[in-house]
Image (cartoon, rainbow, N blue to C red):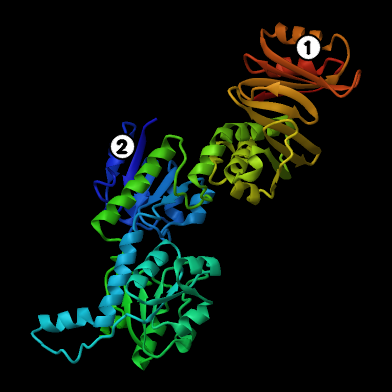
Amino acid sequence: MAYNVLISDPLSEEGIHPLREVENIHVVMETDLSPAQLEDRIAEFHALLVRSQTQVTRELISKATNLKIIGRAGVGVDNIDLDAATENGIIVVNAPNGNTNSAAEHTVAMMMALSRNIPQAFHALKNRKWDRKKYVGVEIRNKTLGIVGLGRIGAEVAARAKGQRMDVIAYDPFLTAEKAEQMGIGYGTLEEVLKKADFITVHTPLMKETRHMINAKSFEIMKSGVKIINCARGGIIDEDALYDAIVSGKVAGAALDVFEEEPFIDHRLLDLEQVVATPHLGASTIEAQEIVAIDVSRDVISFLNGDVVNNPVNLPSVPSEIMHKIAPYFHLAEKLGTFLIDLTNEVPEEVSITYSGDLSGIEVAPLTRNTVKGLLKRYLGSHVNDVNALYLADKKGIKVNESKTSSTKGFTNLITVVIKTNSGTRKVSGTLLNGFGPRLVKVDEYSVDVTPQGHMVVIQHVDQPGVIGRMGSTIAKHNINIATMQVDRSDIGGNAIMVLTIDKHLETEALAELKSLEEIKEVTAIDL
C-alpha cells in the first residue's frame, strides 16, 4: 500500500531523508498552510509530521479520515489533542531524546547569561555605551541550583551544574534518596527546593498539574535575589506573578526561552532589563533538529509498515528488550479475542486476561490491548486498533482485567481469556509452541490443539456413537472439506466439543442443517 505523509512544519531535510528513501511513502512538505487549508487537505494523508507550530486540534483530527499516525519532532505534544487522536485510533509519537543535549546546553547558557548580564551588556555596547559598573554579575560557583523536574533534561542540567561546582537540589515526584545520592545531588519537596535555591530552573512537562506551579505563593517562599530560568514549557511559571516578583525586587532576574503564548513579543516582561529572553531556541541546534526528525521519521516508517514504534505518546512505552519478547504473541492475543467473541456472539460485560509461565514476569499491556482489539472488532470494525482499544472498551462499559500467575498448567506460556456476558462466561486459552506457532489449547474446559487461523467450526454436542459421522456427511453435502478435527469430552456419554478447521466459510444453510442434528447443542462458525 502507498502512503501519503504531510510535513506541515519546517523539519531538517536530512532528518526526513529516511522517509524519502521508502518506495511506498510519498512525502509532501507544505509548511505555510493556514488552519483552514490544512483541514481541507488532511483527508489525503496517512501520516502528519509537525513541530510546535501546527495545532493538531480535535476539529482537524475529525477531518483526518485516513490519518494513522502523528509524529511530533520534539518532546512536548501540547499542540496535539491526544484525547481526540486516541479516540480516533491515531497513534502519536514524539522524539523525547533528540533534543536533550541541546535543551540542557541552552539552559546552562541562559543561566550564565543571566548571572553575568551578558545580553544587557552587549546591547549597551552595541549602542556605544561602556558601563562596566552597571553590569557587575555574580558567580555561579558554590551557588545552589534548584531543579524542578529531574527527567532527561533536568538530569543533564544537574550534571553540567555540578561541573561548574554548584550545589544541586532537585524536586521530582519520582526522585528517591538513593537515586539522588547516586547522582551526587540533594533532593527535597517542591517547597524545600524553592526555599534553598539561588537559581531555579524548571524542567517539567506542561500539564494541568504543572500549569502555574511557580506562582505568586511560590515567589513568596523563595530567597530574595533568586534567579529563575525556564527553558521547558511556557505556562509552568505564572508570567504575571513573575513580573510582579521582579519589580518588587524579590526575584533578581529571569531567563526565559518559552512562554504561555508564542510568539511572545508584547508582554511587559520584555520591558524589564532583568529579563533575558530567547524565542524558543532550546531545541534549535542543527544537531537536535536533525536527530528529532530522524527519530519521528523512523517511527512513522515502522508504524506504516506494521512494525513497533519506539516512542509512542498515547500508548504506554515498553522497553525494546521486553517488546522483543512479547512480539511473537501479538497474533495469538488478537486471535484469542476474535475467537471468543465469535464463540459467544454476545457483547461482553467484562473481559479477564491471565498470563502464565514465561509471560508472568514481564510487561504484557500491549498483548492486552491486542486481545481487546480482537474482541471489539466484531462490533466496531476496523476502527478499533491498538491505540483506542482500551479507550473504546471503557466507553462501552466493558471492564478489562489483567492478571499474571506463575502456574503453567503444563505449558511454557499460556494466555487465557474469559469473557462475561449476559448469558454467562466463556473461556479460551492459547499458547505459542516453539517452532510451531500459536495454538488454541482450551475452549472452556475442553482440551484441543488448533491453529487459530482460517475458517473454523465449533460444535458442542452429546458424546454419542455416530455423531462425528453424521456431522461429516452433512458438511460434505455442502461441498466443504474438513482440514483438521479436534474432539474432547467431559465424560463418556456426556457433553463434548468438536473444533474443525474447514476450507471455506460455513454458509447459513449448512449451519442450520448441522444445528438440526439431534445430538448437537450448538454450532458456531468462526472466521479468523
Relative depth, front residue between 463 and 9: 463
Instruction: Indicate the position of residue 265 as horizontal and vertical percent values.
Output: 27, 75
Instruction: Indicate the position of residue 416 as horizontal and vertical percent values.
Output: 71, 36
Left or right, 190 with respect to 369, comes to: left
Quadrant assignment, res 479 = top right
Left or right, 472 with respect to 64, comes to: right
Which of pointers 2 and 1 lies earlier in the amino acid sequence?
A: 2
Structural crowding at the residue carrying mark 2, measured as other residues with C-alpha within 10 Å and reported as few (<14), some (14–19) or many (≥20): some
Q: Residue at x 39, y 49 (%)?
A: 71
| Above-or-below relation of 284 to 189 | above
| Farthest-out residue, right | 493
Quadrant assignment, res 380 = top right
Name the residue carrying label 2: 26
Instruction: Indicate the position of residue 308 as horizontal and vertical percent values.
Output: 47, 40
What amino acid is labelled 2 in the image?
A: His
What amino acid is labelled 1 in the image?
A: Met
| Above-or-below relation of 211 to 121 | above
Q: Residue at x 36, y 60 (%)?
A: 100
| Farthest-out residue, left | 128
Structural crowding at the residue carrying mark 1, measured as other residues with C-alpha within 10 Å and reported as few (<14), some (14–19) or many (≥20): some
Find numbered disc 2 in the image and state the secondary structure of the residue it sits on. strand
| Above-or-below relation of 274 to 343 | below
Name the residue carrying label 1: 471
Left or right, 119 with respect to 41, comes to: left
Find numbered disc 1 in the image and state the secondary structure of the residue it sits on. helix
Q: Can residue 261 be seen in this view?
A: no
Relative depth, front residue between 404 and 145: 145
